Image (cartoon, helix red, strand yellow):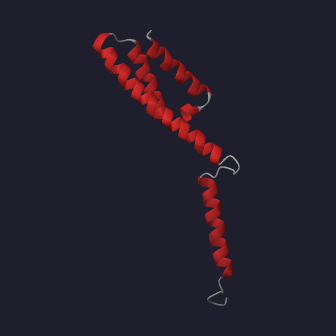
Amino acid sequence: MTDAVTRARALLDAWRARRADRIDAVRFHFIEAMERRTREQTGTVRKLLDERLSSLLEAYGRDVANAATDDAATAGSPARGLLGELVDEIHRHAATRGSRAPTSAR
């Protein structure tokens, strides 16, 4: 194995250990597949694949860094998912309905 592939494998393993593989699971899987294919090649094909693998790793590395920055920025507040947003919307809707006067008597 070349140093480039060894570094790529070590980086992928480190990201997986930090659960950074979940940032974009499909893309991470693609990069792992590219690393395996690159490992099997030689010559000009290997050089081209090494370059492509390197660019994929750099791009994913930027996303890992951005995700870490985003996590640090929101560390003090709880994460709100889609369900949380739905609950907020229900509360807003209920508050709006409760503040209106009834339009007809029953």
Residue drawn at (62%, 29%) of the image: 18
Q: Residue furthest left?
A: 44
Residue in the foreground of this view, choosing between 31 and 2: 2
Residue drawn at (56%, 27%) of the image: 15
> Quarter-wise, where is residue 36 in the image?
top left
Residue 75 seen anywhere in this rendered image of the structure:
yes
**Would you place residue 82 above or below residue 93 in this image?**
above
Q: Position of residue 21 (x, y in %)?
A: 54, 31
Q: Quadrant of the C terminus?
A: bottom right
Q: Where is residue 80 in the image (x, y as percent from the top left)?
A: 63, 52
> Quarter-wise, where is residue 105 in the image?
bottom right
> Quarter-wise, where is residue 30 in the image?
top left
Q: Where is residue 59 in the image (x, y as percent from the top left)?
A: 44, 34
Q: Residue furthest right?
A: 76
Q: In which quarter of the image is the N terminus?
A: top left
Residue 25 seen anywhere in this rendered image of the structure:
no
**Would you place residue 16 above or below residue 68 in this image?**
above
Taking 5 as reference, is 20 left or right? right
Residue drawn at (43%, 10%) of the image: 2
Taking 15 as reference, is 43 left or right? left
Q: Position of residue 62 (x, y in %)?
A: 49, 36
Taking 101 as reference, is 43 left or right? left
Residue in the foreground of this view, choosing between 103 and 14: 14
> How many numbered marks appear?
0
Residue drawn at (40%, 24%) of the image: 53
**Would you place residue 82 above or below residue 103 in this image?**
above
